[in-house]
Image (tube, rainbow, N blue to C red):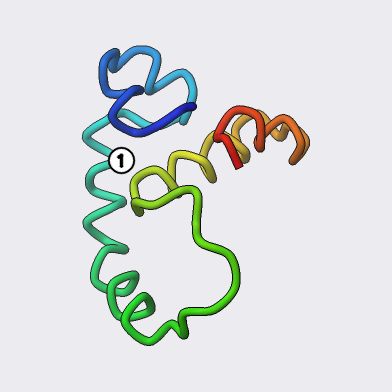
Amino acid sequence: MITFKRLLQSERIFSKMTGLSVEDFKILIDLIRSDWDILEAKKIKSGRSQKIKTLEDKVVCLLIYYRSYINTIFMGMLFDI
């Protein structure tokens, strides 16, 4: 499974897969963190449990999808969802 921590092992691979440097990614996460936390606090707990737990992993998933535009079945295999 692809995760933020796993991609951090190589900044070159992180950049190639997401299109962002690690520093730019961290800036992006800092920009959306407060809004994300507010939305998470308001969210009603119902439905399935989330396979992708952290905000960083969710943003990595989104960036890889937009960068490669692969189908959702393949994304599910990559991210174990």
From the top left corner, tell me how far across and down residue 40 is, in percent. Answer: 36, 75
Q: Is residue 38 left or right of residue 46?
A: left
- Residue in view at x 31 percent, y 81 percent: 41
Where, quadrant-wise, is the C terminus in this rendering? top right
Foreground residue among 75 and 16: 75
- Kindly indicate the quadrant of the structure image that contains residue 77: top right
The residue tagged 1 is 25
Q: Amino acid at mark 1?
A: Phe
Label 1 element class: helix
Near mark 1 (Cα within 10 A), the count class, few <14, some 14-19 or many ≥20, is some
From the top left corner, tell me how far across and down residue 26 is, in percent. Answer: 23, 43
23 up-or-down from 39: above or below: above
Q: Is residue 63 left or right of residue 57?
A: right
- Residue in view at x 46 percent, y 30 percent: 18
Count of numbered labels shown in the rendering: 1
From the top left corner, tell me how far across and down residue 16 is, in percent. Answer: 46, 18
Q: Is residue 58 left or right of residue 75?
A: left
14 up-or-down from 52: above or below: above
- Kindly indicate the quadrant of the structure image that contains residue 69: top right
46 up-or-down from 74: above or below: below
From the top left corner, tell me how far across and down residue 49 is, in percent. Answer: 51, 61
- Kindly indicate the quadrant of the structure image that contains residue 22: top left
Foreground residue among 20 and 57: 57
